[in-house]
Image (spheres, grey):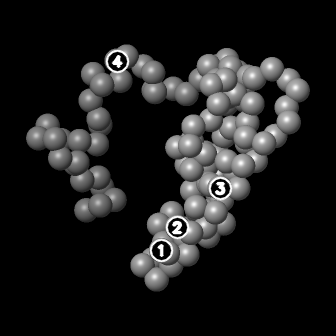
Amino acid sequence: MCRNIKTLANFAPPATDDEIRASALQFVRKLSGTTRPSRANEVVFNRAVDEVTTAAHRLIHELQISTPPRNRDEERRKAHERGLKRFGPVSGRSSPDRAARPNPRSSPGGSVAMTDRET
């Protein structure tokens, strides 16, 4: 869950309120161990998101930073390069002929064919 929380400080353009709230929501989800609270906990969960959003907004906008703001596109490119170096290219994701290849588990009618283990 927390892998989706991104650094928001010192970017040009600055982080939006929506980005800050999304990070706060991910943080509260991680702490609570749930992506959606029960009705009994909904008020407490939403209050926590609001409080974390307020604290994160205050932190991001009050930090004294002496380095120039980072470029979002450049940081995204660097992260992609680090991922390629660490994990290598992901096969099948960007393959243009992937859609043209038939799924070996599906039948001509489009439904999933039964395998020997399912019978």
In the image, taking residue 94 as reference, residue 108 lies left or right, namely left
| Residue at the farthest left position | 109
Mark 4: secondary structure: loop
Residue that numbered label 1 is attached to: 42
Residue that numbered label 2 is attached to: 46
Residue that numbered label 3 is attached to: 54
Residue that numbered label 4 is attached to: 97
Instruction: Work out whether residue 74 or residue 95 is closer to the camera in this orientation and state it.
Output: 74
Decide which of tag 4 and tag 1 comes sooner along the chain.
1
Q: Is residue 31 visible?
A: yes
Disc 1 versus disc 2: distance between alpha carbons? 6 Å
Residue at 72%, 49% (x, y): give it.
58
Q: Quadrant of the C terminus?
A: bottom left
Mark 4 belongs to which amino acid? Asp
Q: Position of residue 82 (x, y in %)?
A: 72, 25
Decide which of tag 2 and tag 3 comes sooner along the chain.
2
Disc 2 versus disc 3: distance between alpha carbons? 12 Å
**Disc 1, disc 2: CB below 8 Å?**
yes
Q: Position of residue 5 (x, y in %)?
A: 64, 46
Q: Nearer the viewer, mark 3 or mark 4?
A: 3
Mark 2: secondary structure: helix
Q: Nearer the viewer, mark 1 or mark 3?
A: 3
